[in-house]
Amino acid sequence: MSSLMNELGARALALGLPLGVHLDLTYRCNERCVHCYLDHEDHGEMSTAEILSVVDQLAEAGVMFLTLSGGEIFMRKDALEIVAHARRLQFSVKLKTNAVMVDAGKARAVAALGVESVQISVYSHKPDVHDAITKVKGSFKRTVEGARLLKDNGVRVSFAGVLMQQNAHDYRGVQALAEEMGVGFTLDPTITPMMDGDRGILDLNIDRALLAQVMNDPALGGEAAAAPAAQPVSHEDAMETIPCSAGHTACYISPYGEVFPCVQFPLPSGNLRQTKFIDIWNDSPQLAQVRAIRVSDLEGCSSCANSGSCSRCPGLAYMEGNMRGPSIQDCEKSLARTGVASENLRRRDAGARPVVWMTAQ
């Protein structure tokens, strides 16, 4: 299956087609997770009719894979109606939820709609730790109950955790719980800055030594680590590759119809309330700018010893000041994975003056 997906992705890239879209239905949520990068207020999210129209436009553009997320998707009473519409159009649909609002009826409905999978946020196997992160007492119990209901109805479920100081030693417990329940497990070592640019929540990141321990934990082998490094490639080949699929074969749509290269890459690229999706995809100057970048263009990265295996995120780099520059967060992950510090990281640690990057216009 992976080889087929790789071929599909390569063909989409060559043809300039959008293969997958992440659509947030709402930023509203019934939890208040300490690490969340979203504003949970409703500033005029799209109506049911608007979202169904967007889904129609995605189908017309050739999109095949649709991820519906939030916020919490089930804060919208029309969530299942939207899923049903997408399935009628033959999308492969993935859902992201905290499952707190999943009851027996919703579980049966999700199963009947034939969604590809449901990813559920679980931050610890310890109820008190998970509840402290979500700031909702009893959320762990309700989340696990919702996950069991989905699993019992034949839905493919996976647990997704974000690594932070509060749960740094709990990931093996979540992994064991997932194995006991027969569901998948991924762990994301990245705390994402707020979409408004506030970087205060990055203080929740674990320290370098613990990150190295986690990144090299044999218990997390294979598919367990979200955003793993790419398979090592030659330095020459790496130089001609694109930094990631954001804006090339995938993009993100906010609840307000805003289009961005990725949910972690908040570069405004158009709004579906003014422009059709296919026109944004084909004609957005911002997306064209993103598509023009190759690894060889990345100042401070093109000569890095880790270039062939780095998981650098251009969105994080953009949030750090320049999408053509380094992401120090990803430099930290490369150091944890390989034991080799990048030049950018060494300069930062030495307190050197930061490199002045050519700012994208």
Image (cartoon, helix red, strand yellow):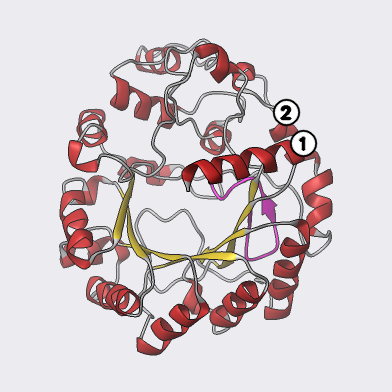
Locate residue 333, reporting x and y percent: 35, 30
Dot 1 crowding, Cα within 10 Å, few <14, some 14–19, many 20+: some
Query: Residue flagged by tag 1: what amino acid is it?
Result: Ala
In the figure, residue 48 lies in which quadrant?
bottom right
Q: Is residue 133 above or below residue 193?
A: below
Q: Secondary structure at mark 2?
A: loop
Question: Looking at the rendered structure, which numbered label has been put on residue 288?
Answer: 1
Q: Is residue 117 left or right of residue 139?
A: right
Q: Which secondary structure is most common in the magenta stretch?
A: loop
The residue drawn where x is 38% and y is 80% is 101
What residue sits right under mark 2 in the picture?
A: 292
Dot 2 crowding, Cα within 10 Å, few <14, some 14–19, many 20+: few
Query: Residue flagged by tag 2: what amino acid is it?
Result: Ala
Q: CA distance from mark 2 to mark 1?
A: 6 Å
The residue drawn where x is 45% and y is 16% is 344
In the figure, residue 236 lies in which quadrant?
top right
The answer to whether the residue labelled 2 contacts the one labelled 1, judged by CB atoms less than 8 Å apart, is yes
Front-most of residues 175 and 121:
175
